[in-house]
Amino acid sequence: MRILETQNLTREFGGVIAVNDVSFKVEEGLVTGLIGPNGAGKTTLFNQITGMDKPTSGKVIFDGKDITGLPAWKISRLGIARTFQNIRLYRELTAVENVMLGLHFKVGSDPFRHRFLQSLRSYVFASGENKELYGKAMEWLGFFDIADSAQELARNLPYGTQRELEIARALSAEPKLLFLDEPAAGMNPAETAHLMSVIDKIRSLGVTVVLIEHDMKLVMNICDQITVLNFGMKIAEGTPNAIKTNRDVIEAYLGREEDF
C-alpha cells in the first residue's frame, strides 16, 4: 500500500530548478532510499514533503490526503517525522530531556490539552504526567541501547549517539513515516553497523522509513526500494539490484569501481 507520493513536484529558486517534476512514491512498511550526487535535490525534496519549504508546483499526498504546502507542525501531527543533515538537538539538555520534548509534542496533539484552562492544572497532575513522559522517554533510549546516557548533556555525547538520540526524539512522536537525512554521516564503521540494526528495529515497529544516504553499503543492504535523483530530476527507481546495474545511475553517481 502506498503511504506517500509526490506528483510532478517542482521547486524553483529564482532561475534554479532544485527539484524538477519529480514523482516519487513510498510503499508502507518498506525502507526507501533516496540517493544521488551532492546538489541533486534530495534534501530539497525532503523539505517540500515535510513542510520545511513549499513547492513551486505539484502535489504531496500522504495517507490519501493532500498535504501540499502545509506547515511542518501540521504535517508532523499527521504522522511524519524527520531528522536533519546537521544534528538539531538541544545541546544543553540531557538525552532524556531531549526525548521528552518529542513526547510533549505528541501529547500536545490532543486538542483538550490546548485549552487555556489546562494551564491551571495542579502541580500534582503535571508532576504525574512528567513522570509518565520520563518513563516513556527512557523506553525510547533503551530501544536505541543508550539508556545509560540518559542524564548526559546532549553536547557531551559521542557523535554517533547524538545521531541516534535525534532519531529517538523523532520516533517518540510515534510517526507513521520517518525521514532520515544522512543518518550515517560522520559515523565510523561500528556506529554505521549499529545504525543498520536500529533501522531494522524501526521497521519492525511498523514505521515506514525513507532515508537520504551516501553510504552505499548501508543503502544497498537496508533499502527495499531506491529512487535516484540527478540535477533535480528522477533518473531511476527500483530495487537495490536494479539500481546498482542501471547504466544512468552508474554514470551519474555510483561509478564503475564501486564494490557493494
Image (tube, rainbow, N blue to C red):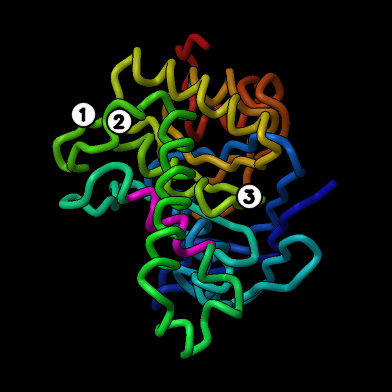
State how far apart marks 2 and 1 are (Cα): 5 Å
Q: Is residue 2 rendered magenta in the image?
A: no
For label 1, the SS is loop
Task: Please report the residue visible at 45 percent of the width from the left and 67 percent of the height from the top.
Answer: 125
Task: Please report the residue visible at 73 percent of the width from the left and 65 percent of the height from the top.
Answer: 61
- The quarter of the picture where residue 168 lies is top left
Residue 252 x, y percent position in the rendering? 50, 35
Task: Please report the residue visible at 66 percent of the width from the left and 51 percent of the height from the top.
Answer: 176
Task: Please report the residue visible at 65 percent of the width from the left and 27 percent of the height from the top.
Answer: 243
- Asked if disc 1 and disc 3 are in contact, CB closer than 8 Å, the reply is no
Q: Which residue is mark 2?
A: 161
Q: Which residue is mark 3?
A: 177
Q: Is residue 99 rendered magenta in the image?
A: yes
- Residue 168 shows in this picture: yes
Q: Is residue 170 above or below residue 108?
A: above
Which callout, 1 or 3, points at the residue further toward the start of the chain?
1
Q: Which residue is mark 1?
A: 158
Residue 66 x, y percent position in the rendering? 73, 73
Residue type of the residue flagged with mark 2:
Thr
Residue type of the residue flagged with mark 1:
Pro
- Asked if disc 2 and disc 1 are in contact, CB closer than 8 Å, the reply is yes
Highlighted magenta segment, given as a residue range: 98-106
For label 1, the crowd category at 10 Å Cα-Cα, with few meaning under 14, some 14 to 19 and many 20 or more, is: few
State how far apart marks 2 and 3 are (Cα): 22 Å
